[in-house]
Image (spheres, rainbow, N blue to C red):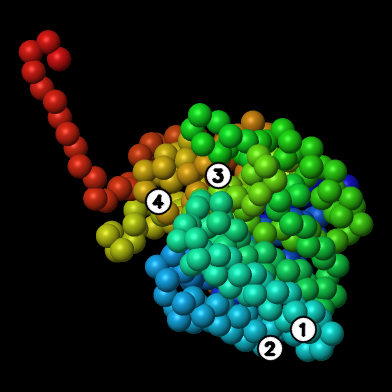
């Protein structure tokens, strides 16, 4: 089997019927064995977390509105995307079950007046899980063999002094065991991003933008040839275009440069995305879902500093600097 590729589609790339069809086109034109990481549709994670916070405050009407909006948004997508009634009915039943589970969790939060990180993760995880199932079904209806694999079966975390951290060795073993057979059958494996299994088997989240990290971990476990993150920007830029209007897209940067830009404020990448890719030197591509002809940015380990070593500027806003001075210091 040729070395697989990993695609990750961000929230805007999953946020409308038109965007999902563009994502479908990117998959259909790919000849390599493929794993797809699906994000929640744009705005859905905030909607879900808002429902949990409303439940904590006893605002039942807000919970009901959020749950109804969650179901409505996805039902509209199903109506626009699927012509086969059996597939649509199965997805509608899945969606209704996820919505009812959301309401049940929020009801418990409202009664207990307690919202734990574990509960928040259980609430937030459904956005990615729903969209991954929707995209897998869309591929199947379009004639592309696809299988849904829940992230908690292939991505694991362990508790460290610094908090939860990906268990890369355990994840790699599960990835090889579960995903490689799917790819050998010629099917696309579709995995929800942003989530993993915790030390006790519970669902945990990988932080904002965690789907980028999901894709990198899957690529590491598979020994992938490349990872492509499809977003709503053309690539990594020399500066924030909102602050610097003539900022331009960088054709290529080194892993270290990309990691530093992400850590110090460039929101286009999850700060930990580079870590799983470094050892195997798996190249990462940032591309725009809505501008498929543009090559985007390549991030790798073979990028030289060049004549102008300073390639980009970034900043973290709202920071304070405290300088302590004194004799002997």
Classify 1 as above or below 54.
above
Q: Residues within 10 Å of mark 4 (few under 14, many from 20)?
A: many
In 3D space, how far apart are the residues under numbered discs 4 and 1 (Cα atoms)? 39 Å
In 3D space, how far apart are the residues under numbered discs 2 and 1 (Cα atoms)? 8 Å
Labels 3 & 1 near each other (Cβ < 8 A): no
SS class of the residue under badge 3?
Answer: loop
SS class of the residue under badge 2?
Answer: helix
Q: Which residue is drawn at 86% across and 67% down?
A: 145
- Where does label 1 land, which residue? 88
On the image, the x and y values in percent for residue 259 come to: 47, 40
- Position of the C terminus by quadrant: top left
Of the residues under marks 3 and 1, which one precedes in the sequence?
1
- Where does label 2 land, which residue? 79
Which-is-in-front pick, marks 4 and 2?
A: 2
Labels 2 & 1 near each other (Cβ < 8 A): yes
Classify 85 as above or below 262.
below
In 3D space, how far apart are the residues under numbered discs 2 and 3 (Cα atoms)? 35 Å
- Where does label 3 land, which residue? 273
Q: Residue at x 78, y 84 (%)?
A: 89
Which-is-in-front pick, marks 2 and 3?
A: 2
Of the residues under marks 4 and 2, which one precedes in the sequence?
2
Q: Which residue is drawn at 76% across and 49% down?
A: 153
In 3D space, how far apart are the residues under numbered discs 4 and 2 (Cα atoms)? 36 Å
Q: Which residue is drawn at 59% across and 84% down?
A: 72
């Amino acid at each position: 089997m040729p070395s697989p590729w990993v695609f990750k589609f961000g929230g805007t790339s999953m946020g409308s019927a038109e965007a999902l069809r563009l994502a479908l086109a990117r998959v259909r034109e790919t000849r390599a064995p493929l794993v797809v990481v699906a994000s929640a549709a744009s705005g859905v994670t905030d909607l879900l977390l808002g429902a949990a916070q409303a439940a904590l405050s006893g605002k039942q009407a807000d919970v009901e509105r959020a749950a109804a909006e969650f179901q409505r948004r996805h039902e509209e997508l199903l109506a626009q995307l699927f012509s086969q009634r059996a597939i649509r009915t199965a997805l509608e039943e899945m969606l209704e079950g996820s919505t009812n589970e959301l309401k049940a969790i929020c009801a418990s939060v409202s009664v207990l007046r307690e919202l734990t990180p574990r509960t928040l993760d259980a609430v937030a995880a459904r956005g990615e899980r729903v969209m991954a199932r929707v995209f897998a079904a869309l591929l199947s209806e379009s004639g592309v063999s696809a299988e849904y694999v829940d992230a908690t079966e292939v991505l694991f975390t362990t508790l460290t002094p610094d908090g939860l951290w990906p268990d890369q060795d355990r994840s790699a073993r599960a990835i090889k065991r579960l995903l490689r057979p799917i790819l050998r059958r010629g099917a696309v494996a579709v995995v929800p991003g942003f989530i993993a299994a915790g030390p006790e088997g519970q669902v945990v989240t990988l932080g904002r933008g965690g789907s980028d990290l999901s894709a990198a971990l899957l690529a590491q476990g598979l020994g992938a040839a490349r990872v492509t993150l499809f977003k709503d920007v053309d690539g990594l830029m020399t500066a924030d275009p909102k602050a610097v209007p003539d900022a331009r897209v960088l054709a290529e940067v080194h892993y270290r440069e990309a990691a530093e830009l992400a850590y110090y404020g460039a929101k286009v990448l999850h700060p930990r995305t580079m870590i799983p890719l470094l050892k195997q030197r798996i190249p990462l591509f940032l591309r725009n879902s809505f501008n498929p002809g543009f090559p985007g940015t390549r991030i790798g380990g073979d990028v030289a500093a060049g004549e102008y070593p300073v390639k980009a500027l970034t900043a973290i806003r709202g920071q304070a600097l405290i300088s302590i001075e004194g004799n002997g210091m």
